[in-house]
Amino acid sequence: MSTPLDRFRELLSIPTVSYADESRMDASVFDEFHRALERLYPKTHERLERDVIARHSLLYRWPGTSSEDPLVLMAHMDVVPVVEAEWQHPPFGAEIVGEGEDAELHARGAIDDKGSLVAIFEAVETLVAEGFTPARDIYLSFGHNEETAGDGARAIVAHLEERGIHPALVLDEGGAVVEGIIPGVDVPTAMVGVAERGVMTLVMTVREQGGHASTPPAMPATARLARAIDRLRRKPFPTRLAPPVRAMLATLSPHTPEPLRTLFRRGEITGPLLAGAFTLGGPETNAMVRTTAVVTELSGAPGENVLATSAKASVNIRLLTGDTIESATAHVRRAVADEKVELEVRHASNPSPVSPWRGEPWRRIASAVVSTLGGDIVPTPYVQLGASDSRWFTAISDHVYRFTPFHLTRSERDALHSHNERIRVEVWLRGIGFYRALIEAS
């Protein structure tokens, strides 16, 4: 008889890779993944209703005693591409390395995001087998193209909206149980995202007549573009403490020594000082206190001896709560200070609304954290630094949260979207208990 770990490994071995160019996606692997779910979780598929949406996304409904105020548990089945040569273990081999408490499961998607998806199925399958009926309907929403900001989750939301479904609580991937991120905090913290930053791509383009590289002009397009990139780097977005970040620091203040305790507790006054200090703490804390911008793609001439008629740079911008697509574009324009640098906005979405960090939905998440993951863990609100499918659900719910119930080290977090992604087996098994507790409290 298979174990939860056996089932997890089998699903990790299916390479459900998504690509921005959907013509590159192999639809058959998603069909294989669907079939594996049906086979591995038969009781779930007998009890719950299932819809296939936008070709490969899945939406399940677990009827409860009441259809009012349902719970939505989210995850996504797709994973980002891999460069196999960079991995110490095969990315889709789902190999277990080490023993006992040190045992790790190495695979693409182990954390992002099949770890949550399979843990949800494990919790549901067990509860269905025990004859449990939730007090309120529960929906399971699993997108197939989250990594490419595709249409799966949006189509699911449209489907629910047409049916008049307004969830009381939505939980998607997000923050984890971490240590050492916030200076001076000496307890593990459960970082529950109450909002997420917006994301946009701004393309900077410089055009010129072109010609042979042997006779370049004084300021070729590539040089003008390079100057614009450097000017933007030298003029980062201003720092500030957004309300969820102030709430995070206030929540954690009792667990810090003085004078940090007072500084964290009085964030409305000490905000400028703290925001400045956070920029020095590393990429994660810097991203908590400002909109960030980084050039990710460059293009120029088609040949090494040809002047570029068009030099382009893609700028990935992550908008902090309170900033907008328009304000970010204006900042870049001021920083570049060159009318010959064209700006074009692509793939833009503003920051999500902020969900409450008080009230019954928040308490359900916090209680599940403390009761299953550790009584010494402090649940705290924060602004999620990346984007997720949950942002689409803010159209139908005021209580959308982002939390992955795994205790992750810095090196484990660094492996997300990189090589050697892995999760400790014991940590993943505890996450099943979190979802079970949340469902039982529904």
Image: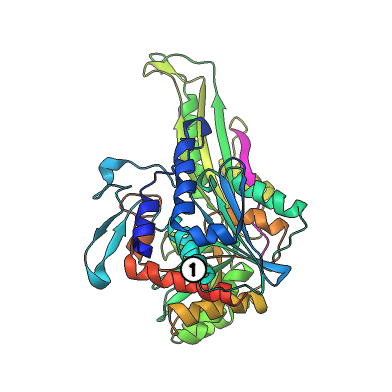
Left-right relation of 213 to 171: left
**47 in relation to 77, above or below:** below
Q: Nearer the viewer, residue 37 or 92?
A: 37
The total of numbered circles placed on residues is 1
Quadrant where the C terminus lies? bottom right
Measured from the top left, where is residue 87 in percent x and y? Answer: 27, 47
Q: Over which residues does the magenta segment extend?
A: 342-355
Residue type (three-letter) at the residue carrying disc 1: Ala
Left-right relation of 333 to 305: right
Measured from the top left, where is residue 256 in percent x and y? Answer: 45, 84
Residue at 69%, 47% (x, y): give it.
326
Q: Nearer the viewer, residue 56 or 380?
A: 56
Q: Identify the residue under disc 1.
A: 123
- Looking at the image, the residue that sits furthest to the left is 98
Measured from the top left, where is residue 346 in percent x and y? Answer: 61, 38
Q: Magenta stretch: residue 118 in it?
A: no
Q: Magenta stretch: residue 348 in it?
A: yes
Question: Mark 1 falls on what kind of element?
Answer: helix
Q: Which colour style is shown?
A: rainbow
Measured from the top left, where is residue 91 in percent x and y? Answer: 31, 47
The residue carrying pointer 1 sits among few (fewer than 14), some (14 to 19) or many (20 or more) residues within 10 Å by Cα, namely many
**215 in relation to 127, above or below:** above
Residue at 68%, 67% (x, y): give it.
70
**Visible residue check, residue 115:** yes
Residue at 32%, 65% (x, y): give it.
424
Quadrant where the N terminus lies? bottom left
**401 in relation to 9, above or below:** below
**Visible residue check, residue 331:** no
